Amino acid sequence: METTTQETETGNRPTHVVKVRDGHGRKASYDRIGVAWENLETGGFWVKLHGTQIVSEGFSIYPI
């Protein structure tokens, strides 16, 4: 059974947070830019970013 975007947003809490790194080394900080849900059937993720994001270096997904 396939889960629609609307069902994912309203029926389940996110399983992961999406963050981008700002800076390098020990001075680096991570800014939260969205959330994600893991799809156990496909092994993939559905990612919802907050606002309009420009991500040039990629992002990281961390379990909640």
Image (spheres, helix red, strand yellow):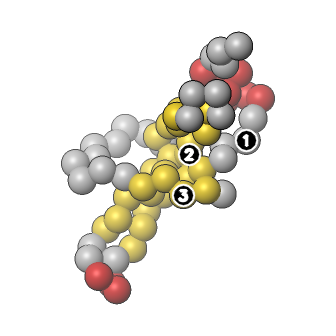
Q: Measuring 31% from the left and 68% from the top, which residue is drawn there?
A: 22
Circle 1: residue type: Arg
Q: Earlier in the sequence, mark 1 or mark 2?
A: 1
State which quadrant residue 41 falls in.
top right
* Residue farthest along the right direction in this orientation: 11
Task: Report x, y in % for residue 63.
Answer: 61, 56
Q: Quadrant of the C terminus?
A: bottom right
Q: Which numbered dot is residue 48?
A: none
Q: What residue sits right under mark 3 in the picture?
A: 62
Badge 1 marks a residue whose secondary structure is: loop
Q: Which residue is mark 2?
A: 35
Q: Residues within 10 Å of mark 3 (few under 14, many from 20)?
A: few
The quarter of the rendered structure image containing the N terminus is top right
Residue at horizontal 29 percent and vertical 82 percent from the top: 25
Q: Identify which amino acid the numbered label 3 is placed on.
A: Tyr
Mark 3 vs mark 1: which is more N-terminal?
Answer: 1
Count neighbours of disc 1 (C-alpha within 10 A) and say few if under 14, some if 14 to 19, many if 20 or more. few
Q: Quadrant of residue 12?
A: top right
